[in-house]
Image (spheres, rainbow, N blue to C red):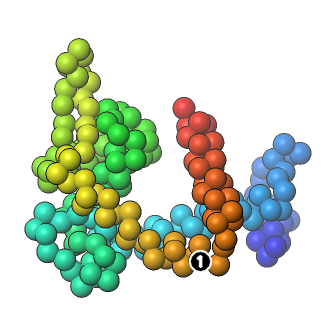
Amino acid sequence: MESLWYIQGMLDKGTVTKEITAEDEISGGALETSQLLVEFLHAAYATRHLDADAAPSLAGEESEAGRVHDTASVDVSTHAVRAAIHVHQHGERTVGQLASGMGISYGWASRVVDELEAAGYLIRERDSEDRRVVRVRLNPEKLSEVERAYRWRGRIVEQALEPLDEPEREAVRKFLRRVTELLLRDQV
């Protein structure tokens, strides 16, 4: 509710210039949920340094933080960890699909693929029918290391889900799947 007053104050001061139409209005619950999603994304970004504990390690050595989070230390960038997770979730991708799915440029996706290929996590192959198309897939030998990246904040998620019963937990998962689906649908 406090946020609504802040927005209204900004409107009153003329800081926000877009006129709110009936189309723009959403329920208070939807607004609060939207704000919570943004705060969630901010919190995830603000704690991204913990991503270093999530990434697979070529050296196979674990840091102290890695032992705490049940993960290994990092030897690839956080973008590379995100890319590896994206390929794990969606299967073989073209570099363009990877870029689009991660919301990054084709050039940046290409650099991330270079990094992951050099580290042995991705296998890059040219399409046999169209040599211009480059496809990437996870190296099966690194699959377990990439899967470990899912667990790095697992304890936090577990704690957040703990007070909910199974139907409520399924509602959370259903909501997150639907929001993701709608966001990606509008991306195209």
- At 32% from the left edge and 83% from the top edge, which residue is drawn? 68
Farthest right residue?
A: 22
Farthest top residue?
A: 129
Q: Quadrant of residue 4?
A: bottom right
Which is more toward the observer, 83 or 155? 155
Q: Quadrant of residue 114?
A: top left
* Quadrant that contains the C terminus: top right
The image shows residue 153 at horizontal and vertical percentages of 43, 72
The image shows residue 21 at horizontal and vertical percentages of 86, 45
Q: Quadrant of residue 124?
A: top left
In the figure, 169 relative to 18: above or below?
Answer: below
Which is more toward the observer, 89 or 119? 89
**Mark 1 burial class by Cα count in 10 Å: few <14, some 14-19, many 20+:** few
**Which residue corresponds to mark 1?**
162
Circle 1: residue type:
Glu
Q: Can residue 63 be seen here?
A: yes
Q: Can residue 105 be seen here?
A: no
- At 19% from the left edge and 77% from the top edge, which residue is drawn? 62
**Residue 6 placement, left or right of 129:** right
**How many labels sit on residues?**
1
The image shows residue 163 at horizontal and vertical percentages of 65, 78
- At 59% from the left edge and 43% from the top edge, which residue is drawn? 181
- At 14% from the left edge and 74% from the top edge, which residue is drawn? 61
* Quadrant that contains the N terminus: bottom right
The image shows residue 75 at horizontal and vertical percentages of 18, 65
**Residue 51 placement, left or right of 169:** left
**Residue 79 placement, left or right of 184:** left
